[in-house]
Amino acid sequence: MSERTTAPLRRFEERPDGYRWQGVDRLAYKDDGAAPFRDVTRQTLFSRGDLAGELRYFEVAPGGYSTLERHRHVHAVLILRGGGTALVGEETFAVGAFDLVTVPPGTWHQFRAGTGGALGFLCMVDAKRDRPEVPDEAELARLRANPALAAFLR
Ligand code: MN
């Protein structure tokens, strides 16, 4: 951690298994084991005690998806590679490289990679943040009843 916070440069590396930054560990997307997701990795690019935010890079393999969740903290997401679909609130959006996605507080969100390649994105968050909540069966049924979301929430 201290090395990550002090090095002035972390070179980008495009590896066969995904985008990487020199000296940055690639981690499991989540370690709580409870929330559903598929084929997602996480790299923390910036995390410092003297900065109120964190910048992370997530990479979703083709066909994979992040957890459908909501929380009080917000996300600023910048798509960096590939394409896919983002669910934000009661809408879905086709997204591609350099698109910017804002997830407001208390808003359901999920990212799905397309089948043609990985979906990679930067995500900025508060360093101190509340834990995500996942939908219960009733809420999931309500979301699935929305025609705009039904195909996405397959
Ligand atoms: Mn989130």
Image: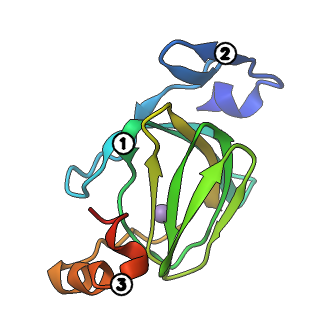
What label sits on residue 13 in the rendered view? 2
Q: Position of residue 96 (x, y in %)?
A: 65, 47
* Secondary structure under the numbered disc 2 in the rendered image: strand
* 10 lies above or below 152: above
| Circles 1 and 3: CB atoms closer than 8 Å | no
Q: Mark 1: which amino acid?
A: Gly
Residue that carries the numbered disc 3 in the rendered image:
146
Q: Residue at x 49, y 82 (%)?
A: 106
Residue that carries the numbered disc 1 in the rendered image:
64
Q: Nearer the viewer, mark 2 or mark 3?
A: 3
> Badge 3, how many Cα within 10 Å: few under 14, some, many 20+?
few
Q: Residue at x 51, y 79 (%)?
A: 72
| Circles 2 and 3: CB atoms closer than 8 Å | no
**Residue 89, can we see it?**
yes
* Secondary structure under the numbered disc 3 in the rendered image: loop
- Report the quarter where the C terminus lies: bottom left
Q: Mark 2: which amino acid?
A: Glu
* 40 lies above or below 51: above
Q: CA distance from mark 2 to mark 1?
A: 22 Å
Q: Nearer the viewer, residue 118 or 26?
A: 118
Q: Nearer the viewer, residue 85 or 129?
A: 85
Q: Nearer the viewer, mark 2 or mark 1?
A: 1
First-in-chain label (2 vs 1): 2
Quarter-of-image position of residue 99: bottom right
Q: Residue at x 66, y 29 (%)?
A: 4
Q: CA distance from mark 2 to mark 3?
A: 41 Å
- Report the quarter where the N terminus lies: top right
Q: Residue at x 16, y 79 (%)?
A: 137
Q: Position of residue 123 (x, y in %)?
A: 62, 52
